[in-house]
Amino acid sequence: MKLIGFRVQNYKKIADTDWITVRNLTAFVGKNEAGKSALFRGLSKLNPSDGEKYDGLKEFPRRRYTNEFKRQDWPVASGKFELEPSE
């Protein structure tokens, strides 16, 4: 199975990245503090390698936490996958 696209929403300062296409080589370039690391930490919630679950108190956008967090189950990371021919 191969990741072909992903989306991060409601994670720290990221409201919604919309769908980002992933190819064999994908580069993320930006200034310091632009959100590159937050993007990948949000994406890691799709399948955490360290077993760390999503903590809304620390990771949901702070300005929205009090009014919105408990209203629904907020998506954080979504992925589009493609099966390899052998699968």
Image (spheres, rainbow, N blue to C red):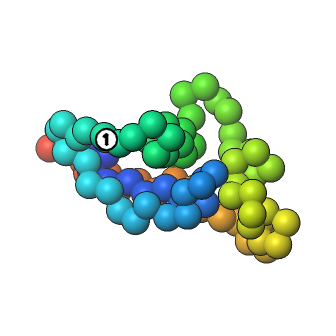
| Residue at left offset 54%, top offset 28% | 49
The N terminus appears in which quarter of the rendering? top left
Q: From the viewer's side, name the closer residue of 63 and 41.
A: 63
Helix, strand or loop at label 1? It is loop
Badge count: 1
The C terminus appears in which quarter of the rendering? top left
Image-based side of 87 in relation to 69, left or right: left
Visible in this render: residue 40?
no
Above-or-below relation of 41 to 80: above
Q: Badge 1: how crowded within 10 Å, few (<14), some, or many (20+)?
A: few
| Residue at left offset 49%, top offset 45% | 35
Q: Horizontal and vertical percent for residue 63?
A: 75, 63
Above-or-below relation of 35 to 50: below
Image-based side of 73 in relation to 24, left or right: right
Q: From the viewer's side, name the closer residue of 30 and 72.
A: 30
Visible in this render: residue 36?
yes
Above-or-below relation of 39 to 65: above
Q: Quadrant of residue 70?
A: bottom right
Image-based side of 73 in relation to 84, left or right: right
Q: Horizontal and vertical percent for residue 16?
A: 49, 64
Residue bearing the label numbered 1: 28
| Residue at left offset 70%, top offset 55% | 60
Q: Horizontal and vertical percent for residue 32?
A: 45, 37
| Residue at left offset 69%, top offset 58% | 61
Amino acid type, callout 1: Phe
Q: Horizontal and vertical percent for residue 54?
A: 69, 45
Q: Which residue appears farthest toward the top when viewing the image? A: 50
Q: From the viewer's side, name the closer residue of 83 and 25.
A: 25
